[in-house]
Amino acid sequence: MFRVWYPTIQFTCKIANPSKGDKIWKSINVSNFVTPVPHIDSRSSKADEFTIDYRSAPGTEFPESYLITANLEKDLQISLEIQRPAAIPGWKIGKGPRGGYSYFGTDTNKPEGYVIHRFWPRIRATGHIVRGGNAELMKGNGMFVHAIQGMRPNLVASAWNFAHFQSEELGGVSAIQMEFTTQEKHGKKGPGSGGVAVNIGSLVVGDKLVAITAETKWPGEESQGSVISRATHVKSEHDPETGYAQPTEIIFEWRGPSTVSDTPGTIEARLEADLGIPEKPRGLIEKIDVLAEIPYVLKLAVNYVAGTKPYIYQVSPGSCLWIYSFLNTSQWVNPGKLMVTGPDELYPGLSSGLGVSGVLYNEATFISQ
């Protein structure tokens, strides 16, 4: 007997307006998926239900962009253009084609698995949503991430943290951070030495990429480096709905050398988030039971769900765009204040520390803790 398995391609979209309490979640199987798209670009793709077109315009104000259009159902269509400003380059940790990779195992040439993260830390987003026969305009600043999980999610990490802060103050500010904590099997000394926290992030001030941060915290070891990139759950409370210790206060920290060539020095930032308690949350958009969102056929066929209970806590900014997908998560959106310190050449008064008011979207994801 001969059997051929074909991949399932899905287009997933979430639209939330916390001020109105609106929330739309769509995840549809697509047909006739093609990538790369002939005669366009290797970073473009299309299907009967959507198109994603990469566009390059060197020497212009926005040298790179993506145009995303989707017909998700009869009463929901989306058209969105995201543009990267010329003054804010994309970034990844590491050089060359392997930049952005995190490898698992002892041999990077033959790893057990990998994940990839590459970012545009501050983009301009414009477009519209058509629902109920009415067109709603969208315009704001956000971030874009190209993320790939090259191994089963329950083997990548036991938990994730994600922060996305945007502000129009100081000429345009962005602070983003992604952190995952490995399973016990992945550590410096092999199985049983895991629980390694891997964190990467960046800071944009004055619409310039001013710092990129990366920190690995090994269990039982004090951090020795001058670069800080970390998310700390200061307080947590048991959430009876999910069974996890939901964070009620998180501190996000960044510290690293300036990436602006003519402005040396150190850039530091700190953001404290008060998320409320499970019975009375602040800015909670949704707790996502990931297994409930996976198509039934995948629950039967994919064995990585065994023994896991993924939840995503989500909080998000109303005017910002984020393109991000995970397992079991809670998501929040709240006003926030980022405290930034750095050379005055980047922005007057920065050496004394400046408070930047904006909006924080953050996620806390639990897979198997």
Image (cartoon, helix red, strand yellow):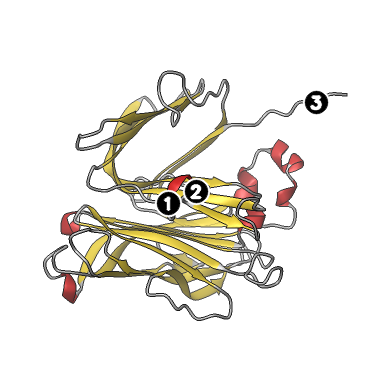
Amino acid type shown at disc 3: Arg
Instruction: Report, in whole angstroms, how far the alpha carbon at label 3 lies from the one at label 1.
Output: 41 Å
Work out whether residue 130 can be spotted.
no
In the rendered image of this protein, does residue 255 appear above or below residue 10?
below
Instruction: Report, in whole angstroms, how far the alpha carbon at label 1 lies from the one at label 2.
Output: 7 Å
3 or 2: tag closer to the N-terminus = 3
User: Crowding near pointer 3: few (<14 within 10 Å), some, many (20+)?
Assistant: few
Quarter containing the N terminus = top right
Q: Residue at x 46, y 72 (%)?
A: 232
SS for dot 2: helix
**Label 2 sits on residue:** 98
Q: Residue at x 51, y 23 (%)?
A: 47
**Label 1 sits on residue:** 95
**Label 3 sits on residue:** 3
Instruction: Report, in whole angstroms, how far the alpha carbon at label 3 lies from the one at label 2.
Output: 34 Å
Determine whether label 3 and label 2 are within 8 Å by CB: no
Amino acid type shown at disc 2: Arg
The image quadrant of residue 136 is top left
Determine whether label 3 and label 1 are within 8 Å by CB: no
In the rendered image of this protein, does residue 296 appear above or below residue 243?
above
**In this view, the mark in front (3 or 1):** 1
The image quadrant of residue 194 is bottom right
